[in-house]
Image (cartoon, rainbow, N blue to C red):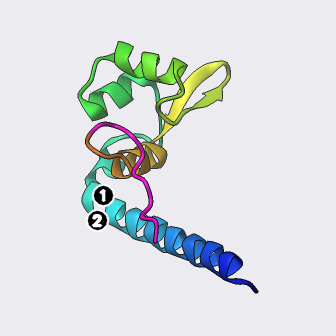
Amino acid sequence: MNIQQRQTQDQAIQKNELDQITIEKARLMYGSLIQKYPAIMCAKEVADLLRLKENTIRNWTSQNAIPHQKMGGAARYVLTDIIFWILTRNKRGQRKKEKEN
């Protein structure tokens, strides 16, 4: 295995470890949300969760700026995907970049 392959493998391991830490952090910090909100939500429920207008959620959906899935032709949002999305954003709403060595 050459140096570049080893670095790529190390980065993948670090990302996996970061994802596991983020998931555990979500469980600890957002456990009450999991009890309050349904596992699969509509735009109105996501807007309530994020304290935004429903139109903002719909706009983000049409721009693919928020994780969603189409179910029966309607956009639906998985609670755990939304929580993970929140945790992996920086203050400007962009995905956090991994540190490069």
Location of residue 55 by image quarter: top left
State whether residue 7 is above or below residue 59: below
Q: Is residue 99 or residue 63 the one in the foreground?
A: 99
Q: Name the residue under label 2.
A: 28
What kind of element bears circle 1? helix
Residue 31 marker: 1
Farthest top residue in view: 55
Q: Which amino acid does label 2 sit on?
A: Leu
Residue 21 marker: none
Location of residue 5 by image quarter: bottom right
Residue 93 position within the rendered picture, expressed as x and y whole percent measured from the top left: 34, 37
Report the side of 66 relative to 50 (left or right).
right
Residue at left 54%, top 70%?
16
Residue 98 position within the rendered picture, expressed as x and y whole percent measured from the top left: 44, 60
Image quadrant occupied by the N terminus: bottom right
Residue at left 28%, top 65%?
28
